Amino acid sequence: MSLRNDFLWGASTSAYQVEGASAEDGKGPSVQDVKTLVQGTADFTVSSDHYHRFDEDIALMAKMGLKAYRFSIAWTRIYPKGDGPVNEKGLRHYSQVIDTCLLHGITPIVTIYHFDLPAALLDAGGWKNRATADAYVRYAQTLFQRFGDRVKYWLTINEQNMMTLCGNAVGTLEEGEDACRTLYQQNHHMFLAQARAMSLCHAMVQDAHIGPAPNICSIYPRTCAPEDILAAQDFEALRNWLYLDMTVHGEYNPIAWNILRKKGIEPVILPEDREVLKAAKPDFIALNYYNTITVQAPGSNAKQENAADQQTGTTETGFYEGIRNPYLGRTRFGWEIDPVGFRTTLREVYERYRLPLLITENGLGDEDAVDENGEIDDENRIAYLSDHIVQMQRAVEDGVDVLGYCPWSALDLVSTHEGIRKRYGFIYVNRTDEEVLDLRRIPKKSFYWYRDVIRSGGIRK
Ligand code: BGP
């Protein structure tokens, strides 16, 4: 094993999924607070109450041995309407969170924007409006100004590719005939916002490291039929390389662009955009990995996958059709499990861009239960994470430079569209989708297991 000495063993959360206090201390509503919830799932008013309990939670993370904590800042705590007057109470809160991390020797890794666009900006047109990119840049500038002395790792936008490909799952899809074209225009404005934030961060923050945080995975062809290979290439261009080519090289991926053009949904680019996009350079690539995806050429015989969330639902008529991979098992919530695919993904991304990689999400959503001894025996999660860590280590042995591993999630939180029934944490939070209960924290078996992995610097296998 040759992980770096300063390897960032960590864990992740995002603001709306963990904090609660959704209208406290001046916070404005975000799209997550106003969206229509999937029936039977908790809303985000209390979530895991991390807003009030961050002290206790970060102390537990320290007990687990975390070297890093990846969390997001709620845009609407800093700018309740997305733009306009700043909310000092929101800034004070995150300043305390950052100081608490540092007190425990935990490196804060801050996501600037994780699925929670201010509702006021949505009302004004959301990301399809260029002014949203200006508001994002002002917001990012405030964060760099206030926290840049203490935060050295920044993530621009969480899963921009999923907001574009699965707008229905994360609340960015607009209804109407032009929905697809709008999505790619929104996407273009997010590219501009990200590029400007990266350049600004380098100008304002000493020793800054900033990068994107898309959801990236290897795409498998169903067979070695050349048509299936083409289908897989089309999908990986549209899902992976469109985002990373733009972030790293400031250019649209040609294959992806051609798909957009053929579908008549390519965005409008202004002449001045090119310079902005070219000027920005990330220091690393952060990526979220849950599983690989398998596709076949359009019109093949195998049954298509029709589910639609960020890890499934992968059909683009005329280009590729998502199918089930018969070689892989699945989680209780239907996501395929592919640790070796984690290794192939890391190799592909590193070979292509030669930038250090930071894993910002990976994990198992499961229905954990407290047993009669008051303990949570989450063996499935331990097996999932263990297999993925081993494959990450193999990727490092293969020559991939990995900065750190921050699985999802540090503690239980409300899933984006499947409620708190779908748990991911190392720390159990005592609540259900129906009842808030006492929100007591209980370290799961995986908590102690991960602590030991961190202590021994990885897994020897
Ligand atoms: C990623 C998101 C996270 C989180 C995770 C698990 O796409 O960045 O916010 O939600 O997926 O997904 P889910 O909650 O749908 O199970």
Image (cartoon, rainbow, N blue to C red):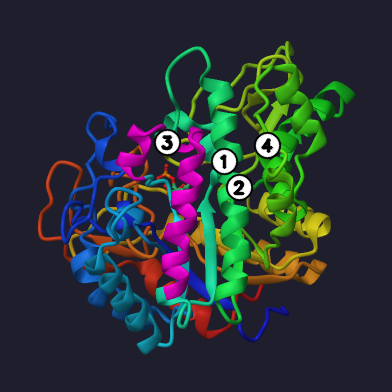
Q: Earlier in the sequence, mark 1 or mark 3?
A: 3
| Distance from the alpha carbon under mark 2 to that under mark 1 | 5 Å
Q: Quadrant of the N terminus?
A: bottom right
Quadrant of the image occupied by residue 63: bottom left
Specify start and end residues of the magenta stretch as a single range: 118-145
Q: Residue furthest front?
A: 272
Q: Residue at x 51, y 79 (%)?
A: 454
| Distance from the alpha carbon under mark 4 to that under mark 1 | 11 Å
Q: Amino acid at mark 2?
A: Leu
Quadrant of the image occupied by residue 59: bottom left
| Distance from the alpha carbon under mark 4 to that under mark 3 | 19 Å
Q: Residue at x 15, y 57 (%)?
A: 24
Q: Residue at x 42, y 46 (%)?
A: 115
In the depicted structure, whether residue 206 falls above or below residue 210:
below
Q: Are marks 1 and 3 in contact (CB under 8 Å)?
A: no
Which labelled disc corresponds to residue 189?
A: 1
Q: Secondary structure at mark 4?
A: loop
Q: Provide the residue designation for mark 3.
A: 126
Q: Provide the residue designation for mark 2.
A: 192
Q: Quadrant of the C terminus?
A: bottom right
**Percent from the top left, x then y, of residue 84?**
32, 53
Instruction: Examine the structure image and report whether residue 126 is included in the region drawn in magenta.
Output: yes
Q: Amino acid at mark 4?
A: Leu
Q: Secondary structure at mark 2?
A: helix
